[in-house]
Image (tube, helix red, strand yellow):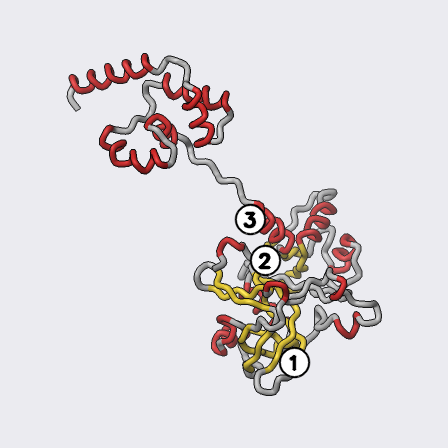
Amino acid sequence: MDFLTELENMASTAQVCIAEEEEPSTPTIEKWQNLFSYTADEAVSKIKAQRADVNRLRVSDDHWELVRDQKSAEGYDREAYEHALSRKPTRSTPTTATAQHHTAQSQRMRYLFKLGGPVDTPEKVREVLGKEDTLLVRTGLNDNEDDPTTSQFCELRASEKDKVLDHLSKFQYTPTLVPLRVAAKDLSSRSIHPTLGLDSTLPQHRLSSAATTNIATPHQNEYPLWYFFYGTLIDTEKLYRLCGSVTGPLIPASVGRGAIKTWAGRFKALLDAPDGEEDSRVVGAAYLVMSEEHEYTLRVNETDNYEVVRCEIRFEGSGEVKRGCTFRFCGPAEGLS
């Protein structure tokens, strides 16, 4: 750009600034309120600031001609369009559904807590938590190859993790916590919760104290345990890779009150059927999981976008029905199709 052209541009800018010193019109203020969610005072302030800024972003005549029809249809004039281009991007406010999902996901999170310091045994962890149930304890090798010793870890829910950290805040001790991306498994011993396609809080699905033992099955730590698989888990080779061995056949089967969708464009997602329709059946395969170790490997494979729920598995051919478990999708609804 030569010197004379630059002088012409500067003169043009000065003329525009002089013309723009007048107060913004009411239609212009309302336009900015609608486009940018400003209050009336904010709109006036933003318009004046933009008009007073001789160095502000300006689009060329050719640029505006290219986009004028589209932007005018969206409610923009040239001035508002230039303001839109100059605004710094802001993070969008999450939708209510997204916020609820993140809250639920954080509540489902699991953590491995390394035993040590003031809580160096499972019994001390149980004392801090005030619970009588047996804790799930895992053993891991130290990262240091020169140190052959092992360490013990307790698996904690998010609420349990918070209690332990609150207790440890009284001591000069830094705990080791490892977040787990594992499918949650919390089978109630007092109700049918969670069960595919059934709301355990409804009166017709509540259990009497006498019936609880017989109906609220399978239990949390019951093995062997029938699982209903769909999607990639109906592949025997994948099961072998995950578990190191396959202890039995995959048997054609189906479950009721379920519906299949696709998540993230490629993953199968089992959901509750609308209104818990029994006739809404999903076809897959049944597999007998022999141990907690094998089940845990499957839960890790599914990640925390899924959760273990009870279900009734109907075996194709024989028509026999057994109570078992399956993986229900509980991830973000935005990725479902």
Which is nearer the eye, 95 or 155? 95
Q: CA distance from mark 1 to mark 3?
A: 37 Å
Viewed as shown, does residue 9 lie left or right of 135?
A: left
Check disc 2 and report its element: helix, strand or loop. Answer: strand
Residue for point 22% across, 31% down = 62
Viewed as shown, does residue 37 lie left or right of 79?
A: right
The answer to whether 236 is drawn above or below residue 78 in the figure is below
Q: Nearer the viewer, mark 2 or mark 1?
A: 1
Check whether the beta carbons of the residues at disc 2 and disc 3 lie within 8 A of each other.
Answer: no
Question: Which residue does the numbered mark 2 point to in the structure image?
Answer: 180
Q: Say which amino acid is labelled 1.
A: Val
The answer to whether 230 is drawn above or below residue 68 in the figure is below
Residue for point 65% across, 52% down = 107
Q: Which mark is residue 261?
A: none
Residue 40 position in % (x across, y down): 50, 23
Question: Which residue does the numbered mark 1 point to in the structure image?
Answer: 321
Residue for point 63% across, 66% down = 276
